[in-house]
Image (cartoon, rainbow, N blue to C red):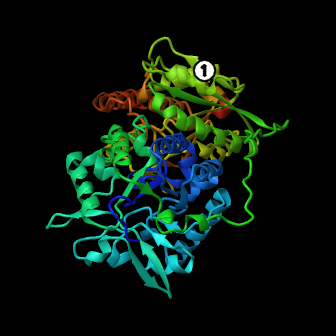
Amino acid sequence: MTQTPANKRHLLTVLVEDYFHVGAFGNLIQQRNWTNFEPRYEQNTLKTLDLLDQYDAKATFFVLGWIGEQNPKLVREIVARGHEVASRGFYHRSLKNLTNEEFREDLRKTNRILEDASGQKIIGYRSAEKLNYEKDSWIFDALAEEGFVYDASFLPSQKDEKAKRFAHKVHTSGKAVWEFPYSTRNLGLGLLPISGGNYFRQFPYTLMRKAVKDWANRYEEPFLFYFHVWELDPEQPRISAASSYNRIRHYRKLDKMEWILRENLSLYNFTGAADYLGLKSELRISNYEMRDDKSVLEIQTPKTKDQKPVSVVIPCYNEEPTLPYLANTLRSVEENLSQSGFQPEFIFIDDCSKDNTLAKLKELFGQKENVRIVPHETNKGVAAGIMTGLLESKTEIVCSMDCDCTYDPHELVRMLPLLTESVDLVTASPYHALGSVRNVPGWRLFLSKGASFLYRRALHSKLDTYTSCFRVYRRSSVINLPIEEKGFLGVAEMLGRLDLQGGKIVEFPAVLEVRLFGFSKMKTARTIFGHLKLLSKLSKLRFFRKPAEIRTSLPKENLKIISKER
């Protein structure tokens, strides 16, 4: 593959994945929730393809198998534009989480999906993370035996022999696999990655530009340039729960990547890995026929006469960034409820939002027959929003949930059966022995558990959690409660007053996760003092007033000794 300066070709590799797939958010975002996010990979991939067309450049597109399964039409579009499709693995998973056999099965599964979608043999692989020659070279055996021709996953270090910094063959299992490592510059003290992506966005580009030019002039081996399609999307949703480091790592200088890419496309001759190896003409699978995609129809779950009607109340205040995720989540929630014998109606309460929440609610949900959107003329608070929803609902069973999905609303299917005839309220509890918490800051947990400790001493019910908004109510049991607090405190007051008038409360062990989009509206100091004030009020009601002085809305037959069910 000897080249002269006039025809020297370099490798362009494009990673087709979305903002919610990345390793920086791996501890926050579960794979099972990927379908809940607003997908942007298609528009970003099409933008990339248009950009490459402008400069007559070709590339290898490393595509997640998950995306190939979700959107085979996009994979076919990449091939139709003259590019190669290669494997990124099915999920964006670290090799640390895969055994040798799991890794091989992942390769096979991804290849089946991508080959079926593209009509090309999949001969290239790039892992979800940068690999190390010393620890990870075992994958070459698996790649060779599974029929791969090349890999582009390894980031060399200074202790590696010089040859491993450049394109080279790895002989294994009686076969040879090409390795195209990340390009680096030797600074004497170590190797600086100069391949593109995050390095180009974070480091001064003057330094990167000079390093790439020096490589092109000095070495015969190809320079490897890469980027993710989400790096061309400065307007992508922000995962606010990420650490400061990961927010900088992911979002900083996103507006920089397009002009960097344009500059490099104008200066250098780029192609894909298979084309560089002279194999592109051999990729097409014989007898493969390009298929037309069938229209995807929205699943309509048939309603049956015996479905039980329920209302789901969702208070919203300045939740515009959260609503696309919520909309995707509620599609499957609605389907699950319908399949489980419930007929859901969704009531959104816009609590006089100052952003475009109300307009976004109308855009996403306004055309659905089983959705009502009720705006508050003034901001009243989350408890007031729940009470408005209870008043608006026409069903005896009413659920309330957080707009940010910090509790998984799919759990309603398991919570609803707990609202038996003798139960007035089912409340989610992350502090239950069978519940759990993920990624929530420790100080928030300390305050919440401290409040629960005090409420256990002020009320009859000895619960693990008193402040959750994720609940199932018997409407007649709570509609006339004299709730004075309208904000976060009102959620605890509602449970407290129900407790004092003899309501039966059941806990459901749930998982509480950190809020992904936007920010909590709770004022910490004000809430702490508010809880102390509310605790004092509830204690006085319990210990110093006659039962007749506690207003009740429960029928006499429901005034039973409160018990906690597990």
Q: Residue furthest left?
A: 188
Query: Looking at the picture, how far across and down is residue 451, in whole percent?
Result: 36, 40
Let me know if residue 495 appears in the view.
no
Q: Is residue 476 above or below residue 187?
A: above
Q: Is residue 319 left or right of residue 501?
A: left
The one of 373 and 539 positioned closer to us in this rendering: 373
Which image quadrant: the N terminus?
bottom left
Q: Nearer the viewer, residue 368 or 308?
A: 368
Residue holding disc 1 = 373
Q: Position of residue 3 (x, y in %)?
A: 37, 66
Q: Secondary structure at mark 1?
A: strand
Residue 330 horizontal side relative to residue 342, left or right: left
Q: Identify the residue at horizontal 39%, vertical 31% (top origin).
A: 539
> Is 252 above or below relative to 371?
below
- Nearest the viewer among 288 and 309 is 288
Horizontal arrangement in the rendering, residue 25 relative to residue 41 (left or right): left
Instruction: Say if 380 sits above or below 138 in the image.
Output: above
Task: Specify whether residue 289 is in view.
Answer: yes
User: What type is the residue that disc 1 sits on?
Assistant: Ile
